[in-house]
Image (cartoon, rainbow, N blue to C red):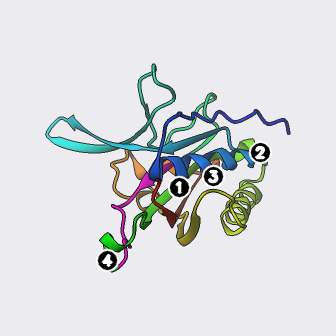
Amino acid sequence: MQYKVPRIPTFTGLEGIDLRVQEIQIKLASEGWLQYSFGLCDRVQEQKGEEIETIPVCHIDDHSDPLDMRPFLDDAHNSYCFWDMVGEATDYGDNLGARRFPVLTYDVACIFVVNLASINTDSKIARSTVRQDILTFFNQTIRFNGIFQITSIEERDIELIFDGFDIYDPQLILRDSVGAFRIDGTITFKQDC
């Protein structure tokens, strides 16, 4: 099967957690089935009737409108992933003043949505292939300016995969031909000078 070169929106001038995620995001492009690799999403709140929805959005470039990352697949987006920063930095150490450049730890999640039929006609084999590729990628030594450690993996419940975000018709999203995966983990790095 012929794969397209993935589109990887990158930005210059990033620092801290944004830069570390972008470093990993670029390396994710090595996964042949991944069509789009996005960085950290923004959590946008939108009024929908009486309710406020929380939506993950990613920027493609400095000039386009942000893209809603909630589960969708079409001909233009057979597979994509994006990152969510789950909390604020922790683990500054006991004495912040004694460390000129503290070590920071962020809880993050990398969320994948994949058209399994674009990988293999047998969705069970495609799901297994994608799962193994993701685990191999994150469990190998990822060379970037920090450390990534997996804390949990989710692939069965779309509401847990998109935890913290509002999604439409969760029962309709994970069908035979659609797979979604969430890799929760921590990124630890020394604060930029």
Displayed quadrant of residue 4: top right
Which label is found at residue 176?
3
Q: Main secondary structure of the magenta part?
A: loop
Name the amino acid, label 4.
Answer: Asn
Q: Name which residue lies at 77% across and 45% down.
A: 32
Q: x%, y% of residue 113? A: 57, 48
Outermost top residue? 63
* Mark 3 residue crowding within 10 angstroms, few (<14) / some (14–19) / many (20+): few
* First along the sequence among labels 1 and 2: 2
Q: Which residue is mark 1?
A: 110
Task: Tell me where residue 1 appears, x and y as whole percent.
Answer: 85, 39
Q: Which residues are drawn in magenta? A: 82-93
Q: Which residue is mark 4?
A: 95
The answer to whether residue 110 is above or below residue 14 is: below
Q: Circle 2 sits on which residue?
A: 32
- Select label 4 or label 1 by which is in front: 4
Identify the mark nearer the N-term, 3 or 1: 1
